[in-house]
């Protein structure tokens, strides 16, 4: 490696760390992203001057095609589809690293040392696992594949077996590197199938954890590439991506009250099966409210907290939520938003949607910041959230979500729940909040309900 | 070989540590931009892809490199663009908003964190 290239990579690595540092506050975040872009530009230009590169046609074609696809996706995609886009890009990241690994192996003709072989094996395995795992997550989010967990007898044994078989494969390749080139392709096939098998048993509500984990795997695959190509910048960037995925996975698992081991191996199917619970049982009475009833409650309130959930994303109701909040604020009512770490399908999902709808971020509150406020709140509006407002998480030790930190919504004076129907949600867990005397259920599409609420508020005002 | 491995592990361990420290300061508000930002950064595998696509070794490794360049560039360009698009949306209360709405005491509390 020429000194120029080494220094360029060093500068790029520093810029990437500064980029992440910028994300520690919304004010400095955009500046941070500019540094990240500068780092990437320096790294790519320096690489193009690499002496190993003889022809530029394919590189240029790839850069143009990739930029085209990347630009098109990022300009067109609605914010509600953010989890899908992230899953999709993890798939691309995994694909790129797996292909670089295979390509490097072919280039050397199998004449590699143990370190390179081991790194290539890990790279190809993690890359292909991330590729299919992310495609599965994408399919589940997009609804191509059922969002419910797919389980079968002996699933754990199959998955653990596949995993150990891969470990054996990797060890064999490290012992006698490059002697059996077919082994690397088998490793690739194993990675591809483990990616599919591991995400199959995971339900929609666990998606924030899965996406964070895949983020981490994509990073580790890039770091393994760095070991194989002896490139420090790849090791550093892989480590940064891996640690961000690890950090988010830990955070998500804490917010769901699962141990980290459960999250890691939850991906291998050791989850509890949440279906059936509460599906039958006698129908409990609940208060179904009309739009006018709901509007009257909001009119009488001084303080209102909005709790958004995945349902808000599904019905694209973020703008309607903002409009209702604006109508309330106009009447002098104080409105805040309570954002649970696992609300939605990825970390920070709700924050992005509300930001898109022009809600100022100082109105958004984390769990710890707002949980004591519910007792002093006149009305809570639950928009498409379910598990994160389920009191069973605090009291019912038999509930699958027992121990998960949830909002103390039931302590507020009145609760409006906007929900499509009385069916149990994604997780299939019954929510007693819906049957409290202080709860009013407003059934129907959240966006339509919110829009009619705004109209009703305005009419009553006259 | 051992030297390379140990040297690589040093860098990996230190970068993981720095990354974890820096990232744990990112507020939940920005977790989606964080994810798409780190995704763009891990598109650095583009540099490996470029070497694979351009070193003209044989047609298979060039073809694989070409696909890798496409995929990695999609992540780099798309990742940075969409992160910026998201970050542009995050706004604090503007002056006219602040005049209408009196800041609740918990805002001050939140700022103190």
Image: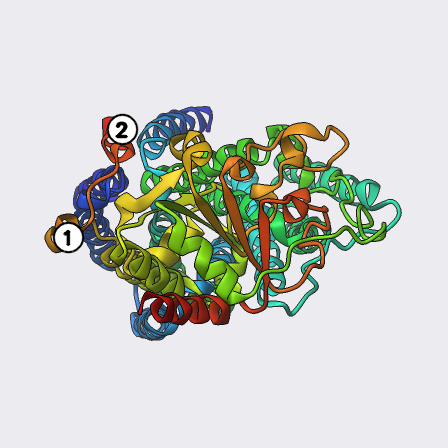
Q: Is residue A2 left or right of residue A184?
A: left
Label 1 crowding class (10 Å Cα cut-off): few <14, some 14-19, many 20+?
A: few
Which residue has dot 2 on it? B109
Tag 2 subunit = B
Residue A416 visible in rendering = yes
In this rendering, the answer to whether A156 lies above or below A327 is: above
Tag 1 subunit = B
Q: What residue appears at the point 29 percent right and 70 percent down from the top-left corner?
A: A56
| C-alpha separation, residue under disc 2 versus residue under disc 1 | 19 Å
Quadrant containing the C terminus of chain B is: top left
Say how the picture is coloured: rainbow
In this rendering, the answer to whether B73 lies above or below A455 is: above
Q: Which mark is residue B94?
A: 1
Q: What residue appears at the point 31 percent right and 49 percent down from the top-left corner?
A: A333
Q: Is residue A38 left or right of residue A129?
A: left
Of labels 2 and 1, earlier in sequence is: 1
Residue nearer the viewer, A219 or A250: A250
Secondary-structure class at tag 2: helix
In this rendering, the answer to whether A185 lies above or below B109 is: below
Q: Are marks 2 and 1 on the same chain?
A: yes
* Residue A335 percent location from the top left of the image: 33, 48
* Residue A384 percent location from the top left of the image: 54, 56
Q: Which mark is residue A344?
A: none
Label 2 crowding class (10 Å Cα cut-off): few <14, some 14-19, many 20+?
A: few
- Extreme residue toward the right, this view: A153
Q: Is residue B52 left or right of residue A168?
A: left
Residue nearer the viewer, B69 or B62: B69
């Amino acid at each position: 490696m020429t000194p120029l290239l080494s220094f360029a990579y060093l500068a790029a690595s520093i810029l990437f760390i500064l980029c992440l540092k910028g994300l520690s506050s919304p004010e400095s975040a955009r500046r941070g992203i500019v540094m990240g872009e500068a780092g990437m530009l320096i790294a790519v230009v320096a690489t193009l001057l690499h002496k190993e590169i003889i022809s530029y046609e394919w590189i240029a074609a790839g850069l143009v095609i990739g930029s085209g696809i990347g630009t098109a996706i990022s300009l067109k995609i609605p914010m509600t589809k953010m989890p899908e886009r992230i899953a999709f890009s993890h798939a691309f990241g995994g694909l790129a690293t797996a292909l670089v690994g295979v390509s490097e192996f072919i280039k050397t003709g199998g004449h590699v040392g143990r370190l390179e072989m081991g790194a290539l094996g890990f790279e190809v395995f993690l890359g292909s696992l991330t590729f299919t795992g992310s495609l599965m997550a994408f399919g589940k989010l997009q609804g191509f594949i059922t969002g419910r967990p797919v389980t079968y007898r002996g699933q754990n044994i199959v998955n653990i077996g596949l995993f150990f078989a891969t470990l054996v494969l990797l060890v064999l390749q490290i012992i006698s590197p490059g002697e059996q080139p077919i082994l690397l392709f088998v490793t690739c096939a194993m990675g591809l199938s483990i990616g599919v098998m591991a995400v199959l048993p995971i339900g929609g509500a666990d998606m924030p954890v899965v996406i964070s984990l895949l983020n981490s795997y994509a990073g580790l695959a890039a770091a393994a590439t760095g070991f194989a190509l002896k490139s420090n910048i790849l090791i550093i960037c892989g480590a940064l991506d891996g640690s961000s995925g690890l950090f988010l996975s830990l955070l998500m698992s804490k917010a769901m009250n699962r141990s980290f081991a459960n999250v890691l191996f939850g991906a291998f199917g050791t989850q509890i099966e949440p279906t059936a619970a509460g599906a039958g049982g006698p129908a409990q009475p609940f208060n179904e409210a009309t739009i006018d009833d709901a509007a009257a409650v909001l009119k009488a309130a001084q303080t209102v907290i909005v709790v958004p959930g995945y349902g808000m994303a599904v019905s694209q109701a973020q703008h309607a939520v903002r409009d209702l909040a604006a109508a309330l604020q106009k009447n002098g009512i104080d409105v805040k938003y309570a954002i649970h770490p696992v609300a939605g399908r990825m970390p920070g999902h709700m924050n992005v949607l509300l930001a898109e709808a022009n809600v100022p971020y100082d109105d958004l509150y984390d769990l710890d910041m707002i949980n004591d406020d519910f007792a002093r709140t006149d009305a809570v509006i639950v928009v498409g959230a379910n598990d994160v407002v389920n009191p069973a998480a605090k009291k019912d030790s038999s509930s699958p979500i027992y121990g998960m930190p949830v909002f103390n919504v039931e302590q507020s004076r009145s609760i409006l729940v906007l929900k499509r129907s009385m069916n149990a949600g994604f997780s299939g867990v019954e929510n007693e909040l819906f049957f409290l005397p202080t709860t009013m259920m407003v059934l129907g599409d959240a966006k339509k309900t919110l829009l009619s609420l705004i109209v009703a508020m305005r009419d009553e005002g006259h | 070989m051992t030297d390379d491995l140990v040297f690589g592990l040093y860098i990996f361990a230190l970068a993981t540590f720095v990354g974890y420290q820096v990232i744990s300061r990112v507020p939940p508000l920005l977790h989606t931009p964080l994810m798409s930002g780190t995704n763009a950064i891990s598109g650095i595998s583009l540099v490996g892809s470029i070497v694979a696509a351009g070193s003209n070794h044989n047609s298979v490794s060039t073809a694989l490199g070409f696909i890798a360049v496409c995929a990695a560039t999609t992540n780099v360009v798309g990742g940075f663009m969409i992160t910026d698009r998201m970050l542009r949306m995050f706004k604090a209360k503007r002056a006219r908003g602040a005049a209408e709405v009196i800041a609740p005491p918990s805002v001050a509390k939140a700022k103190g964190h």
